[in-house]
Amino acid sequence: MPALVNCGGDRDIRPGGPLYSNLMESSLFLSLTPNVDVYCPPRKRSRVTAPFILTSHPEPKPALKKPCSIDVLPDECLFEIFRRLPADRDRSASACVSKRWLFLLSSIRTCEISVEKCKKVSPSQQDVTPLGTLKKPLPDLNGEATMEEEQETETKAGHLSRCLEGKDATDVRLASVAVGLAGRGGLGKLSIRGSNTTRGVTNLGLSAIARGCPTLTALYMWDVPFVSDEGLSEIANGCPMLEKLDLSQCPLISDKGLIAVAQKCPNLRSLSIQSCSKVGNDGLQAIGRGCSQLQTVSIDNCPLVGDHGIAGLVSSASSTLTKIKLNNLKISDIALAVIGHYGKAVTDVVISSLLNVSERGFWVMGNTRGLQNLKNLSITSCRGVTDLGLEAIAKGSPNLKQLCLRKCFYLSDIGLKAFAEAAGSLENLQLEECSRITLFGILAALLTCTSKLKTLVLSKCLGIRDITSYLTQLPSCVTLRSLTIRDCPGFSSSSLAVVGQICPKLQHLDLSGLVGATDAGLLPLIESSESRLVKVNLSGCMNLTDAVISPLARIHGETLQLLHLDGCRKVTDASLVAIAENCSSLTDLDMSRCTVTDYGVAALASARQFNLQVLSLSGCSKVTRASFPFLGNLGRSLLGLNLQQCNNLISTQGIASLEEKLWWCDILS
């Protein structure tokens, strides 16, 4: 190649030059740019150390490259990456990157996580461990468990619980719970109360819980309007260990969701449904057929639930069902008849606001004789409760121990007496707003069931009035330990003296709201009591004075633990002095709106062997700032102090100093 040998310099290597025009092999040239040609001989180092710019055209700027990110991968690839992360904390850390990653991680089921088991590595090989294997953590020299050991301990100890309320109840929070608790023993109990108005809980959040928390055993959803059957079905599919389900004000959940639970959750033991307008008979029947371990059922204000739903549920779960609660349902006598026939294992029944149930329903429920194990019965606002029906229930439930009747306006003394004669095991009788019950009926009931009755509660019974002539034989109920006569305006002092004769062994006495109670009526009861009183509530008895409170403290001071005198305006410092001197076991004292002063507070603070835990001086206008030093000396046992509405006592500096001195005590001001 003579042209190459005769090359004299750079001027020969140019467009139009001799070498350029007489080129024999064009492959020896490399075009760097459209306007730059460089000679590149093979197997030889180039003489040129920089590119030749032979034209005046500017070089174009290189385009900016987009930063490489893992987010460009599709969800399927990220899913495969995330499920292969070696540790739970790695997945938790990844969930903090973005919402997309969080929901991707929450969509991974526990069974889909693929983690290779750690291989044991000898000490000589610890520094050359291959990438991707995990080293065994070193033991903590201070005796504290490492993070892995703590997770293992939590797994063995049991499940965790979480509660989301109001604005905190969102899908993001549920997804975070599902990812964060997957490796810490698993979520066992989840409560969702309310929902965020703009970003509330939906099926997406429940799906995250279903996939990440297969150990869930209890789910409570109250006022969650955006969750439908799809979300509940996800819970049923992903959480087969579910034992408790409580749904309240979930308008989108219907029978379809309950059927899914019945098919996938055979261990369900407790079901509570309240104000779910789409739940009907089919869902309850499916629960009865599919959940063979069902023990507790509560159905409240569900308009589509009728006799077929209750009957199917009770008849299918007759061997395990122990507690039934029915409120405000459109059921008739048929449902109660089925309960009376199939409720062989039932121990507790709560019935309220069943307007379509008549006297016949309660009569049949008792006469079927299926409620042999019934122990507790509560009936509220049912027009069908009459004398005949109540007597039938007593005969059909020989083991009944507690009866609570509220707003049963058709029940009279005749039915109460007949019930008391048939119920030989009755221990607790509560009557509230039963206006046709009089003091004659109460005395007759006490006369017939004096062997086991321990508690008697009479509240807002307008028929309870003083009587001038009593029975020829007054009953002496030596087993009665607790007596409550609350807000019965017709019951006054003339009948209190008789109570002391009838109930000589009282320990708990509640006469709150008896405006007619006086010292003359209450003092004989206190003096004739053979057993020492433990709890006494006299709130609202405005006519009581120190003449009865001081003897109460002296006679029963050694055993008295609770004394409430809220609203007893005639009680003064003399009672506080007697309480301080005699009531060594008192733990709860309420002197709200009493006429006590700084002197009484000082006497209370100077008491010896005083274990007071709760003290209320609310509304005591004569207690001033001079009491701050005495209140601070009440002792380390004080846990609660109520100083509300004490206008002469409250001051910012005084309360601050008192809180500093009683730092362990809750102070209301």
Image (tube, helix red, strand yellow):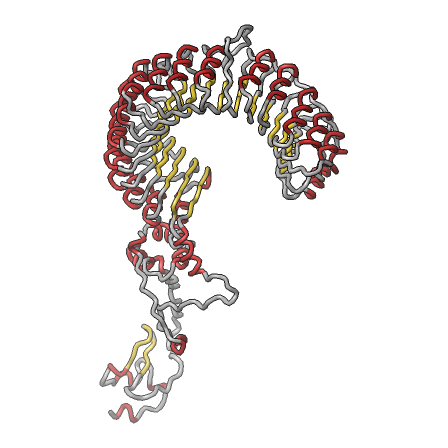
Asked which quadrant contains residue 171, the reply is top left
Image x and y of residue 462, in percent:
51, 12
Residue drawn at x 28%, y 36% is 257
Q: Nearer the viewer, residue 496 or 92?
A: 496
For residue 319, above or below residue 544: below
Image x and y of residue 16, in percent:
30, 81
Asked which quadrant contains residue 631, the reply is top right
Please identify the quadrant where the N terminus is shown.
bottom left
Q: Is residue 305 visible?
A: no
Image x and y of residue 558, in percent:
64, 32
Image x and y of residue 241, in percent:
31, 44
Q: Nearer the viewer, residue 262 or 200?
A: 262
Q: Residue furthest top?
A: 468
For residue 461, above or below residue 178: above
Residue drawn at x 71%, y 33% is 604
For residue 617, above or below residue 201: above
| Residue 614 falls left or right of residue 408 | right
Q: Is residue 662 visible?
A: yes
Residue drawn at x 42%, y 61% is 148
Q: Nearer the viewer, residue 313 or 447?
A: 447
